[in-house]
Amino acid sequence: MYRSIACSLATLPLLAVPAMAQPLNGSIGVSVTLAPDYLGSDDYKTRILPDANLRYGDQFYLNLRDGLGWNLYHQKNWTLSPFIGYIPGRDNDGDLSRFEKIDGGITGGMRLRYQPGPWNVTLKAQTPLTGDMDGYQVILRAGWRHSISPNWSAGIGPNLIYSSKEWTQSLFRVSATDAARSGFQRYEPGDGYWRLGLSGHVNYRFSSNWSLTGLATVTRLTGDAKDSPIVRQVGESTQVLAGTVLSYHF
């Protein structure tokens, strides 16, 4: 009996090694983007930000778009993962200098991904846990990626985003205080809205560890977001983002 227990205990470190020895891989780098000053703005700002896309084996991931996630279920082409992310708010400068500032915050959510070959489809739902945002958001993305040559690859895909009534109100409401300060007409969104988009990228792997990616996205605001004075009077319902990312892979 004691010999059996001893043998069982002796095997525990051997069983733990594969779980603890999973490799950390991915990329880190820097991005330079030209994007609207805020969602719905027609003024553009250049931003230089760190970029990361990290994976710990098949269990955990960290990137700026999907946050920090745990692949709770991973079977063939399907992955289900709870995650913690971040949603930006809105500064009170430029056209909205007389508005109240909206603080961004941490979000929590669930992500379902299906990836058969070069195609991938992702459905993600999230809700704010901190900050000034309320409600929830549901994001559906599809993408196709193809290797053009050993060093070149490209991808393209549509996306569809639904923001709830409370989420829409957080960003596109003109409160009584905002209206009195700015001269804008008071506005209270009565429903959620859809955002339609199309994204594409081209990647050049110029060495074994380094790559340069060019990316572009165009989106269209609809519904109560589009009708807000924040967009209708001083903004634009069509939003464009363009940029480059320099990455080191390991």
Image: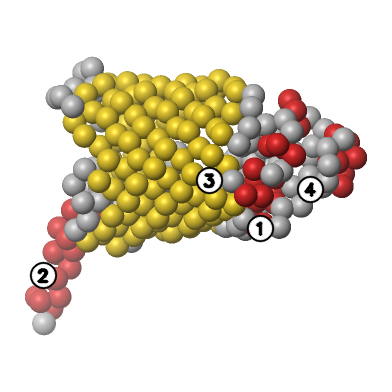
Q: CA distance from mark 4 to mark 3?
A: 19 Å
Q: Which residue is mark 4?
A: 187
Numbered badge on residue 78: none
Of pointers 2 and 1, the one earlier in the residue sequence = 2
For the point 40% across and 55% down, the residue is 123
Of pointers 4 and 3, the one earlier in the residue sequence = 4
Of residue 212 and residue 199, the one placed in the foreground of this image is 199
For the C terminus, give its image quadrant: top left
Q: Which residue is mark 1?
A: 191
Q: Amino acid at mark 3?
A: Arg
- Secondary element under disc 3, as helix, strand or loop, is strand
Q: Amino acid at mark 2?
A: Cys
Of pointers 2 and 4, the one earlier in the residue sequence = 2
Mark 1: few/some/many CA within 10 Å (<14, 14-19, 20+): some
Q: From this view, report whether residue 158 is shown above or below residue 206.
A: below
Tell me whether the residue at label 4 lies in contact with that at label 3, contact meaning CB atoms closer than 8 angstroms.
Answer: no
- Secondary element under disc 4, as helix, strand or loop, is loop
Is 204 left or right of 228, judged from the image as shown? Answer: left
Q: CA distance from mark 2 to mark 4?
A: 71 Å
Q: Quadrant of residue 153?
A: top left
Q: Quadrant of residue 157?
A: top left
- Secondary element under disc 1, as helix, strand or loop, is loop
Of pointers 2 and 3, the one earlier in the residue sequence = 2
Q: Which residue is mark 3?
A: 195
For the point 21% across and 51% down, the residue is 116
Q: Quadrant of residue 54?
A: top left
